[in-house]
Image (cartoon, rainbow, N blue to C red):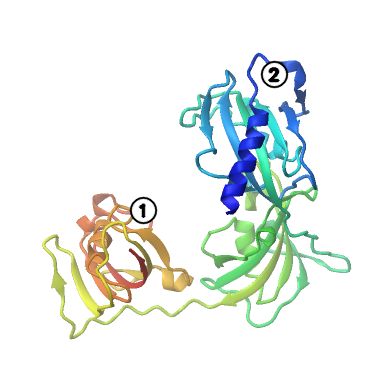
Amino acid sequence: MRKARFGVIALILLAQTSFSQNWVDDSLFKTTPSGLKYLITRQGKGDFPKNGDRVWVHYNAKYINDSVYDSSSDRGAMDFYLGQGQLIKGWEEGLQLIKPGGAIILIVPPQLAYGSEVRTGIPANSTLKFEIALIQVNKGTPIEPFSVEGKTMEKGKKKLKYVLIEPGNGPLAQFGDNAFVHYTGFLPDGTIFDSSVKKGDPVRITVGSKQVIEGWDLGLFLMKKGTKIKLYIPPKLAYGNEGYKNLVPENSSIILDLEMVDLIPPEPIVKWNIDGKQIHETPSGLKYVIFEPGEGNLIMPENIVTVHYSGYFINGKLFDSSVKRLEPIRFPVGIGSVIDGWDEGLQLMRKGSKFQLLIPSHLAYGSQGAPPQIPADTDLIFDIEIVDVIQ
């Protein structure tokens, strides 16, 4: 019902934003300091959206000659978070000029669109035109920076500085621990550029795994469960001379408020013992051992599976594990989204199956390998459990 309601409203609003080039002349548009041109064709009601808010929109995307190259009208309303790098700069700025129920036409110069980058159907250095109807806004959670009043600034490694807001309890985070963290990232002027608090869920990070910027990784080692800490991260430990999307300028320091919601040591991973088990082999050279047969129908091509796995080299050394990360993976079978040995082996399994796959190199990563983790011409072993199957 909601999609239908959005669709009807959006069609009305988009109809009101559709102008011929002859009717809408350039003098009707206002220009912001950034160079964005805009014409509000209908102002809505309520509050203007801000960074961190979730917005639903319908849009027509046009070249400057008014020919349409993309539209949401046949897909339903699109939703985004403002200020999270999901949108081009012109959209980020333009959407904050109208209220829910409003509509706007944007003429976006290249530096606020895709610049010199070539996109499918969009040449480099294109000026683009958008007709946008703002359908709904969900306000983000209000965020107050951690107060450092009365606290002492400490020095960490590699010029990282921090203020411990709350000490937390238990052991400090160790390499490989699963850290569940709420974060808010600030620019030096206090602007929020990203926040899990606004999105509602903490992120899971494997401590020391380089999933996040170096300053954040270093900060996690200072934390316990329940710790709150403010990190002052210099550019070299943040996003360096590249910056981050359109959110963090190049060579910018950042400030991170972190809360360790939970800290869970990694699961001990032991390769399944195949002693006394029958080893089966397929014509392709794939070998497999059945630990649990599972129930229901065999997995078929294009079924979507949820899988826990641990991957080993032939010498038994673990190189990857979803069990260790506490996160099964999900993907369609038989369409090449995983290595050939997996695609073949999974189609021998059912929901609840536990198999060990012994995969020769030509069914794994072959002569190219998967640098730097997996060398060329390497046979691999996977312990696989099918958690769920959508047929």
235 or 332, nearer to the observer:
332
- Residue 7, image quadrant: top right
The residue tagged 1 is 371
The residue tagged 2 is 24
Residue neighbourhood size for the residue with mark 1, other residues' Cα within 10 Å, grouped as few (<14), some (14–19), many (≥20): few
The location of residue 279, given as percent across then percent down, is 16, 76
Picture disc at residue 117: none
Residue neighbourhood size for the residue with mark 2, other residues' Cα within 10 Å, grouped as few (<14), some (14–19), many (≥20): few
The location of residue 104, given as percent across then percent down, is 70, 32
Q: Earlier in the sequence, mark 1 or mark 2?
A: 2
- The residues bearing labels 1 and 2 have C-alpha atoms spaced at a distance of 55 Å
Above or below — where is 285 with respect to 252? below
Q: Is residue 246 left or right of residue 71?
A: right
Residue 229 seen in this snapshot = yes
Above or below — where is 191 with respect to 96? below
Q: Are marks 1 and 2 in contact (CB under 8 Å)?
A: no
Q: Callout 2, which amino acid?
A: Val
Q: Callout 1, which amino acid?
A: Pro
Label 1 residue SS = loop
